[in-house]
């Protein structure tokens, strides 16, 4: 069965500093990995995904994530944080492949707080 | 990306009543999903709603409590029946397109915030 771990409930960073939100996963076979962001009183917005190919994927709002197969990680990063990045971030994983439906499994979420 | 709308955006309901949440998508999709996000929690899949077939429920969720309709490829409803305060959550509709580009991605609606008194 798939699982996702986000070890940090909250990450605090000062504006302008780089940020990292951690995610590790467990899945049978090749993983499809996703990051979503949830702003207060909003739904989930898709940020980026890794399906195959280059291990470094770039997404919306200047975010990027690096797929590391040996460490089974998919950490979310941004070189320079903005106050507006403050939100709840979810990592999710699905088993790859085209045969049948594979459920998307979410981590518990990490709250990012960017201070001015 | 998808344009997904939900109605109502929020509601306050009395114990024992039922609420039907609507989800409308801007284009046809094969798979639609309903999630629950309890306060301070992650997302939990309630059921998968495919057009032309019965919804498939996850463990812990039953059709009598959460009946789902999927009358066409752009619309679905979720009913929360005989509500109790424990049903207070955000309910999210999600879709996945089955086309070559972006088919692996699920997109989410803005959510319906439900408070049961």
Image (cartoon, coloured by chain):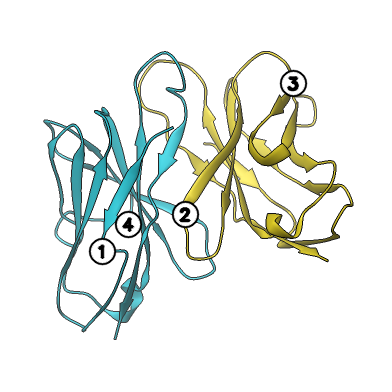
Chain name for mark 3: A
Dot 4 corresponds to which residue? B60
- The residue tagged with tag 4: helix, strand or loop? loop
Q: Which residue is mark 2?
A: B43
The residue tagged 3 is A55
Same chain under badges 1 and 2? The reply is: yes
Q: Quadrant of residue B53?
A: top left
Q: Residues within 10 Å of mark 1 (few under 14, many from 20)?
A: some
- Residue B16: x and y in percent read 16, 80
Residue neighbourhood size for the residue with mark 3, other residues' Cα within 10 Å, grouped as few (<14), some (14–19), many (≥20): some
What's the CA distance linking mark 3 and mark 1?
Answer: 40 Å
Q: Nearer the viewer, mark 3 or mark 1?
A: 1
Which callout, 1 or 4, points at the residue further toward the start of the chain?
1
User: Which residue in the structure is indicated by mark 1?
Assistant: B8
**Residue A73 visible here:** no
Viewer-proximal residue among B76 and B36: B76
Residue drawn where x is 35% and y is 73% of the image: B88
**Distance of label 4 from label 2 (alpha carbons):** 14 Å
Give SS at disc 3. Answer: loop
Residue A9 in view: yes
Q: CA distance from mark 1 to mark 4?
A: 25 Å
Q: Marks 3/4: CA distance?
A: 36 Å
Letter of the chain shown yellow in the rendering: A
């Amino acid at each position: 069965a798939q699982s996702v771990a986000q070890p940090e409930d909250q990450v605090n960073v000062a504006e302008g500093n780089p940020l990292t939100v951690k995610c590790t996963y467990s899945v049978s076979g090749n993983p499809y990995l996703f990051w979503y962001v949830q702003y207060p009183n909003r739904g989930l917005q898709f940020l980026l995904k890794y399906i195959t190919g280059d291990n470094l994927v770039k997404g919306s709002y200047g975010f990027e994530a690096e797929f590391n197969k040996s460490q089974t990680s998919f950490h979310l990063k941004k070189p320079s944080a903005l106050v507006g990045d403050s939100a709840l971030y979810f990592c999710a994983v699905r088993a790859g492949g085209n045969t049948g439906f594979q459920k998307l499994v979410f981590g518990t979420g990490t709250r990012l707080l960017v201070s001015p | 990306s998808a344009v997904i709308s939900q109605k109502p955006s929020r509601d306050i309901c009395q114990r024992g009543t039922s609420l039907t949440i609507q989800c409308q998508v801007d284009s046809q999709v094969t798979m639609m999903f309903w999630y629950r996000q309890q306060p301070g929690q992650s997302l939990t899949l309630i059921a998968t709603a495919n057009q032309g077939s019965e919804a498939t429920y996850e463990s812990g969720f039953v059709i009598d409590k959460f009946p789902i309709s999927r009358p066409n490829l752009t619309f679905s409803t979720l009913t929360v029946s005989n509500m109790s305060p424990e049903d207070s959550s955000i309910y999210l509709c999600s879709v996945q397109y089955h086309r070559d580009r972006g088919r692996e991605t699920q997109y989410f609606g803005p959510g319906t915030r439900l408070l049961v008194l």
